[in-house]
Amino acid sequence: MNWVILIVAGVFEMVGVIGITKVNQSPSVKSYLIMFGGFVLSFSFLSLAMKGISMGTAYAVWSGIGTVGSTLVGMYRYGEPKDARRLFFIAMIIGSVVGLKLIS
């Protein structure tokens, strides 16, 4: 169950980053709520997950989910480059996260 909570924390990390983009594009109460809400929920779920997963593993997986998810959202929603090198390094992050899960 802790791993599911950690994945939820990573998804909310992505929501927070999307909120940052929305704040930069058009600052409004709604965009600030998305940003702050995403980060508050992300840290809350991360804290819960760390009750059953070691800090180093939880933080690495959480930041990996946030990094990969935010990069993919940027590529497919905001038109960021989709070159092979970026996709290769995203795959490396995913492989690292899976590896941490397998050895934990």
Image (spheres, rainbow, N blue to C red):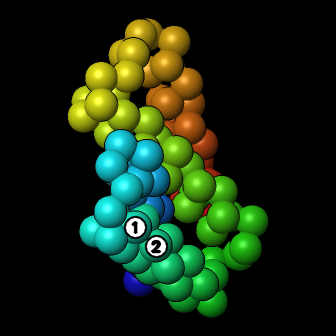
What distance separates the C-alpha of mark 2 from that of mark 1? 6 Å
Judged from this view, the residue extending furthest toward the right is: 56
Choose mark 2 or mark 1, whichever is in front.
1
Left or right of residue 28: residue 3? right
For the question of whether residue 88 can be seen, the reply is: yes
Residues at badges 2 and 1 in contact (C-beta under 8 Å)? yes
Q: Quadrant of residue 74?
A: top left
Left or right of residue 20: residue 22? left
> Which type of secondary structure does the marked residue at label 2 adopt?
helix
User: Which residue is pictured at 40% across the width and 67% down the height?
Assistant: 32
> Which type of secondary structure does the marked residue at label 1 adopt?
helix
Quarter of the picture containing the N terminus is: bottom left
Tag 2: amino acid: Phe
Tag 1: amino acid: Tyr
> For mark 2, what is the residue?
36
Quarter of the picture containing the C terminus is: bottom right
> For mark 1, what is the residue?
32
**Residue 87: horizontal and vertical position, in percent?**
44, 21
Front-lying residue, 34 or 1: 34
- Pointer 1: residues within 10 angstroms few (<14), some, or many (20+)? some
User: Which residue is pictured at 56% across the width and 77% down the height?
Assistant: 43
Front-lying residue, 62 or 30: 30
- In the depicted structure, whether residue 72 falls above or below residue 47: above
**Residue 49: horizontal and vertical position, in percent?**
54, 81
Q: Residue 102 has which mark?
A: none
